[in-house]
Image (cartoon, helix red, strand yellow):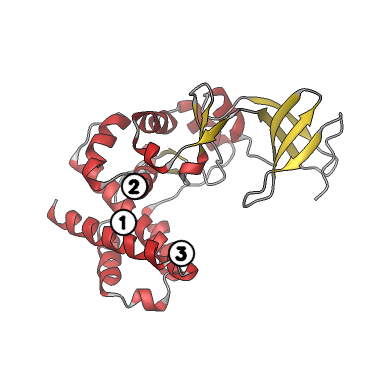
Amino acid sequence: MALDISDGWSLYPLGGNTGTAYMGTKASQKVFLKQNASPFLAALSMEGITPRLVWTKRLASGDVMTAQEWLNGRTLHREEMREQRVARLLHRVHHSHLLHDMLLKVGGRFTTPAQLLTRLQPALASDLRRHPLIQSAFAALQSEQPQLPKTRYEVCHGDLNHKNWLLSDRSRLYLVDWDAATFADPALDLGALLCEYVPVEEWQRWLQDYGERVTPDLTARVNWYARVHCLTVIAESYHQQRFQIMNQHLILLERLTREAVTD
């Protein structure tokens, strides 16, 4: 789609799933441009969670273009997700009053355990729904839904892929791509991240780095959301015929289900 932001800016598409991100250049200036980014971006910028917001411009089409400072750097490697700096930045996100108030102001949605299970069930292919482990795991998830009240829900990122963590060449860490942001139990983010990047033996240490007292309640909630994440990946991997990834998550799901029973 042709975009006209005039003022001498040249745009270069950056790819991605949505096709709405660009590198913008003008003389010696370079910025990261995003089309129709959430107004939530301003709060993220103020908190230093994302790169600094430079300007916002409404286009003739009615679309809104936002410009953020262009940072030289790289995304995190998978093994770097185990580091304390990742845990501490996520803790800042979950405990920011500014982010909470702004997401509320822009109509942020809430994600409950029941909603996750409602979405998950039809995503599982019929072959998977007949799998004994998946049947027992799903039944356990239904009966063990965390009861954290919505008043204790926080801003969650919702897509903590290692490619959404940007490390600048000045060693400053940022978390980007907030399209999936939601109000939820913070364990939603924690369970998904731990499931993908941290060996189970290190979960307690990582949660301590995150900055919370590791209580039986927190451990149980993280385990529950990690099992939901495992089932989600299993469903997606089956449809994509990525059976190695599917089997890895089946093994982890079995372990987490077993540990949930013994705790």
Q: Depth check: 146 or 17 in front? A: 17
Q: What residue type is labelled 2?
A: Gly
Q: In this view, does 240 lie above or below 227?
A: below
Q: Depth check: 10 or 42 in front? A: 10
Tell me the mark number nearer the camera, choosing from 3 and 1: 3
Q: Distance between the residues labelled 2 and 1?
A: 8 Å
Which residue is painted at 75% across and 34% down in the image? 24
Q: Is disc 3 placed on a helix, strand or loop?
A: helix
Percent from the top left, x then y, of residue 17? 62, 52
Q: Is residue 238 above or below residue 104?
A: below
Percent from the top left, x then y, of residue 101? 51, 31
Name the residue beneath numbered marker 1: 227
The disc, 3 or 1, on the residue closer to the chain's N-terminal end is 1
Tell me the mark number nearer the camera, choosing from 3 and 2: 3
Image-quadrant location for residue 107: top right
Name the residue beneath numbered marker 2: 191
Name the residue beneath numbered marker 3: 236
Q: What residue type is labelled 1?
A: Arg
**Horizontal side, residue 244 vs residue 135: left or right:** right
Q: Which amino acid does label 3 sit on?
A: Glu
